[in-house]
Amino acid sequence: MSCLPRMARASSFQACLPASMSCLPSMARASPSLPATSSTCTTPTVVPAGPVLLGQLASGVSQAVEMNNGTKELAETPRMALVATEEDDNEPMPCAFGNYVLLVTFVKSANYTVVLPTAHNYSASLGGGGWLAGLIVAVAFAPGLLSLPLAPRILRNGYKPGLSAMVLLCAIGNACYGLGQLAGSLWLLVAGQALSGLLWGACGRALAQHVVYACCGKSRRSAWTARNGNIGFLGMGMGPVVAAGLSKVSFKVAALSVDEYTAPGWFFCVVWLLMLLVLPLIPEPERRFETGFVRCTNGEERKCVVWPDGKTLWCLFSVMVCAGTVAVWETSAAIVTQRYFGWSVRSTSLFIGAVFLSSMIGGELVRCLLKRKPSLHELDVTVTGLAMILICSSMLYKYLPSSQSPTHSYEVTYTLGSILVLNAANYSRNYSVAMALRSAASVSGEMKDMAVGAQAAFMMTGRSGGALLGMGLAAMPGGANASAGLVTGISGFCLLLLALPKLHSAIREV
């Protein structure tokens, strides 16, 4: 094997050096005036100038030492330009921008759930049914799938322009939701919800994970991802609480009526406009950990993995299952509590909010547990959560005949089952996202970039599909059992996939 002819080309030399350490002794003795010779590499060549050669040697030795120490990412992605060093692995998320991203997650989640207690009645007042109400809720996320392919282009040069556009669209969309009653049109509600969710894919879900991998050290990424998920659950809990507070609002401005149906739209329109005013005060974060790729100069075509492997796909599917579980429950609970239990809009709102808040607390407890016990694998947490969803969803069924009115025992079991299912779905989703991104990053940087968009797509698909099916099924006769059966089925299927050969062990190695 001859390495010295490649030394005239620096990019090829760096690719060759770690695999051919037998050439190092002779190269280390080379000087600007003498040709380099070696017992194993004897072909004469032109040697670079001393400072250039020393820089190449230092880079090669550094890469070799990292490979010998078991640096997995370097071994599997030799063409990745690693910007950050091991000393920066504990670098925290930039405070101001990180907190703003968390605030966006909180407000968007609250904006999504604030309409749950009243969406069905709002739709009925305009001549719509349960499925149209489900569509109104579902399109709050579904259009974001259209913007996901644009995420690399939107986020390439900065985060703030994309965030500004998304926040502005959210404000306009909520204004449309508030105007739906005045216009007497269900489709204005649908259009407003779709407009507010249009950029959520690229500038919401994908942006949050892009920030984690570009601005945050390795050792803090899983914890920050979990915190972002928990903040989202906190927002989903506060949305119904806000709805409960707005349920007593009723006044008119000329022909415009502001009541329990339209007030959520106007309230969050103001909130998003305030956030738009705050954004210019937040500095753009430094992307210390962003990775790029060195293009091959020797004519060799770069091989890129464009499809995730089995372990990454399972993690992504788990994200969709957990997101779907949350959506099915939250939309069906708004109907079950009012139709079967006879609760008011205010009581339903407080109930949904309390369940989400308990899930946020449970997610934070699990995050602290993993921090104290690093030996506990995230896969164990995820599988435990999916098993809890499967088992505890049995408490959501209405076992009494439809002719018999529900008793207080059904209310108690439904409440307890809701708390357990939502807690499990929260932390299972958080660590499924973390495992999916880490699994993809272990293959290549390109795979990681693909997984950032894929996890957002899977999550929004689960939320949108679950919202549509949850409210649509719950509005049908026997809908409580249909929605509960959907939760049982998807969680059981996800666990069943782990029986595939070597899949469980492959995920544990991530």
Image (spheres, rainbow, N blue to C red):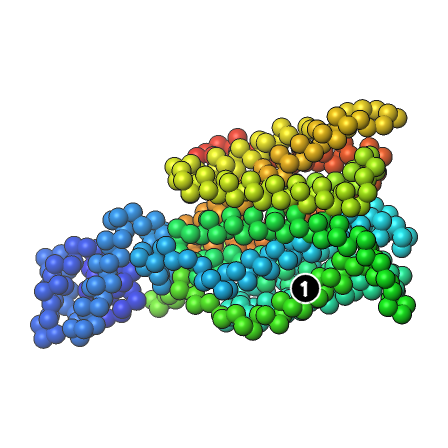
- Three-letter residue code for mark 1: Val
Asked which secondary structure carries label 1, the reply is: helix
**Does the rendering let one see residue 177?**
no
What is the x, y in percent for residue 182? 88, 64
Quarter location, residue 187? bottom right
Residue nearest the observer in this picture, 22 or 132: 132
- Is residue 200 depicted above or below 160 in this figure? above
**Does the rendering let one see residue 264?**
yes
* Residue assigned mark 1: 271
What is the x, y in percent for residue 368? 46, 42
Residue nearest the observer in this picture, 16 or 94: 94
Residue shown at the point (67%, 54%) measured from the top left: 110
Q: Can you say which quadrant of the picture contains the C terminus?
A: top left
Residue nearest the observer in this picture, 147 or 278: 278
Residue shown at the point (36%, 55%) measured from the top left: 89
Query: In the rendered view, does 32 fall on the left or right side of 456?
Result: left
